[in-house]
Image (tube, rainbow, N blue to C red):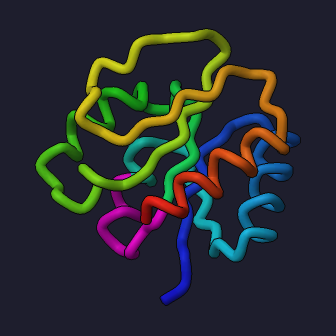
Amino acid sequence: MSKKAILAVHHDDERNAISGLLVDQRFEVHAARTGYDVMCLVEDFEISLIVTDIQLEDMQVWKMLSKLKENKTIASLPMIVLSDESVVAPLSNFPITLVVRPVALTSLRQIIRQLEESL
């Protein structure tokens, strides 16, 4: 089974760097721009990891998660949420790792490896 990741990051440079990092770690990367796109990809594929901005084009990630909380698959799906500031995750029953920008790729690589160990 191949590992699949959803990448929903708006900054082009950041998205390209993270996509390269995920590919290096043998993930098949699926791009998303909106929370709706993420929800569709979660339904269509067996996803191993989501890396997303806290604010998507159409909704905040917390709203997306509240819409998906009925889906048992996503309830245990590791998620890395990128933010410009520290925030409290209102849906603590999801396995969320908050990463505050600027994102260091070495740190992100380590976080992804740790999350993979729990898969």
Q: Is residue 90 left or right of residue 112?
A: left
Q: Magenta region, mostly helix, strand or loop? A: helix
Q: Residue furthest bottom?
A: 1
Q: Which of 7 and 104 lies nearest the eye of the viewer? A: 104
Where the C terminus falls, by quadrant?
A: bottom left
Q: Is residue 33 left or right of residue 72?
A: right
Q: Residue 67 is drawn in which quadrant?
A: top left
**Vertical comparison of 92 with 43: above or below:** above
Q: Residue at x 64, y 57 (%)?
A: 113
Image location of residue 31, percent across then percent down: 61, 59
Image location of residue 48, percent across then percent down: 46, 66
Q: Residue at x 38, y 75 (%)?
A: 46
Q: Residue at x 54, y 84 (%)?
A: 2
> Any magenta on residue 41?
yes
Image location of residue 116, percent across then percent down: 54, 62
Q: Residue at x 37, y 20 (%)?
A: 89
> Any magenta on residue 77?
no
**Vertical comparison of 4 with 15: above or below:** below
**Vertical comparison of 33 with 73: above or below:** above
**Vertical comparison of 74 with 87: above or below:** below
Q: Residue 99 is drawn in which quadrant?
A: top right
Q: Is residue 41 left or right of residue 105?
A: left
Q: Which residues are magenta?
A: 39-48
